[in-house]
Image (tube, helix red, strand yellow):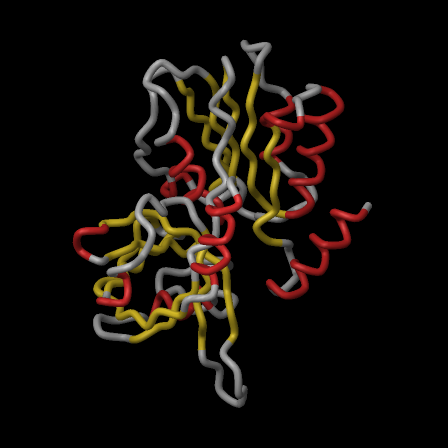
Amino acid sequence: MSIIDRVKSIKNRRISRKLQVKSAFNLTPNMRRVTLHGDALAGFPKESEGAYIKLLFNQTGQEKPVMRTYTIAQQRTSQNEIDVDFMLHGSNHDDNSDIQGIAAPWSVKAKTGDAITLMGPGPTKFINLNADYFLLAADMTALPALTANLKTLADNATGKVFIEILTESDKQNLQKPEDIEIHWIINKAPGSDESPLFNAIKNAQWLGANTATWVACEFKTMKKLRQFLKEERAIEKTHLYVSSYWKKGNTEEEHKVAKQADSID
């Protein structure tokens, strides 16, 4: 990223935009899509799919709103609209009565006309396209960002994609090159120590020497995958992107502290 682009990105992250809910519906049993729109998106940077945003949620008894980070799943610039997908953590019932957190319960209750404040977008994190083979992996929290990455791949790209979901019904039809294989991994207990996403990648056959990776998931699984990709697969630093989007049992604020500590280790 150039200095000019970096300055623009920092400026965008500080812009506050008040938007309205246009629609809200379940893409799958455990993934809910909320479409936000408004004139405040008129100056929103184009091609922001995959970029992160901050949503501000007012909480009873608190002076300041709580901020939560999400990814832009789809953008329709001409209509001043963006789609934001929410994983319904802890949802085990048809009425979604036990959904955990702050943002996901809001998404379930959201109705047309509801107001919400957005800040951003931040920069996008895309896979290095200068490679012969691609490996992408995500759990449901990072699925919108992974989807944006898939759209950047050339039509003749080859590789594998691993996506951890809660149930078989959470599979989605994704736009991808023909020779990119998608493997869905069912994990009814996301964030568990078993790390089925890690095991699936560890046991997979790789066909390319010059490989680029893009991985985003829960903190513990991220650490296992980072070590495996760096040490056992020897992926070059320029071709390695590994990030945690959440940590089981932690709020976003606590997860941020854990990420900072991990970056120092």
Q: Residue at x 40, y 52 (%)?
A: 30
Q: Nearer the viewer, residue 23 or 38?
A: 38
Left or right? Give the position of 100 relative to 222: left
Residue 114: percent from left, percent from top: 28, 75
Q: Residue at x 30, y 49 (%)?
A: 27
Q: Residue at x 39, y 25 (%)?
A: 153
Q: Residue at x 41, y 60 (%)?
A: 93
Looking at the rendering, which quadrant does residue 20 occupy? bottom left
Q: Is residue 92 visible?
A: no
Q: Nearer the viewer, residue 212 or 28?
A: 212
Q: Nearer the viewer, residue 9 or 81?
A: 9
Residue 203: percent from left, percent from top: 63, 20
Left or right? Give the position of 173 relative to 239: left
Residue furthest out toward the front: 4
Residue 215: percent from left, percent from top: 56, 35
Quarter of the image that includes the C terminus = top right
Q: Is residue 89 visible?
A: yes
Left or right? Give the position of 78 relative to 91: left
- Relative to 94, does residue 218 appear above or below in the rendering? above
- Relative to 133, does residue 109 appear above or below in the rendering? below
**How many callouts does the rendering have?**
0
Residue furthest out toward the left: 79
Residue 70: percent from left, percent from top: 45, 56
- Relative to 206, does residue 221 appear above or below in the rendering? below
